[in-house]
Amino acid sequence: MSAESTGSRGFTYWRLRFRAWRGNRPFWGGLFTMIGGLPIAYLPYADLRLGNMTIAMATTAGAGSLIIGVLLVTLGLTMWFHSIVRVFAGVAAIVLALVSLPVANIGGFLMGFLFALIGGALSASWVPGEPVKEESTDEAGLPEGDEGVSAPFDDRADELSAVTPQTNATDSTIDANGGRNSAG
């Protein structure tokens, strides 16, 4: 640290760090899976009060609902902090969401089921992105090898010539591969 800095980091620094952390893992899949586990685990133990009347949602499947909900929250955290097992965690979340339909009050009244199903699918289908390669440029700011290009409409002429079929003096047929011969 220099003598001029206060040592505190601003909001932008932490926002960019969170964005980089979030981009390296199936963040939304883990979040949806955890959100899906909460109603599945909570609703069998919830009491709803309407005036003096208490409606208890306690069922015989309360323990199964609690186990499924806790496992879904654990799988969501696993997707965040151990993203190497994202496919296993996604498939396990989908299976637990399906099991929650008959076991846990129709999957937490379909809310938990849908969130866990979407979260598991997002996690199973997520792949890490490839880093963007920067092109090397010359002094004029043009990519390497584009010294002769000066008119902005030169690319349009190339597109038009690629669309029109080329005929050869010896062969007037166009092959299935768009008129390009593999030999030449």
Image (cartoon, rainbow, N blue to C red):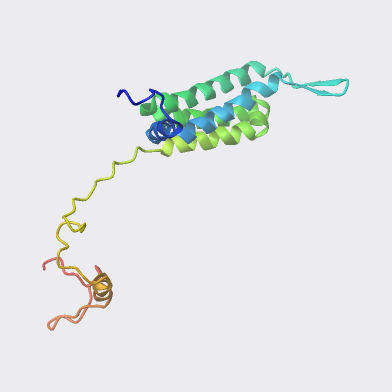
Residue 141 position (above or below residue 25):
below
Residue appearing at x 18%, y 53% in the figure: 137
Residue 138 position (above or below residue 15):
below
Residue appearing at x 88%, y 20% in the figure: 52
Give residue 126's position: percent from left, percent from top. 40, 38
Q: Is residue 50 left or right of residue 15?
A: right
Which sits in the foreground, 158 or 92?
A: 158
Which sits in the foreground, 90 or 138?
A: 138
Residue appearing at x 87%, y 23% in the figure: 51
Q: Is residue 79 left or right of residue 4?
A: right
Res. 99 visible in picture = no
Extreme bottom residue here?
A: 169
Residue 157 placement: quadrant: bottom left
Extreme right residue here?
A: 52
Give residue 81's position: percent from left, percent from top. 41, 24
Give residue 34's position: percent from left, percent from top. 54, 27
Quarter of the image containing the N terminus? top left
Q: Is residue 145 left or right of residue 16?
A: left
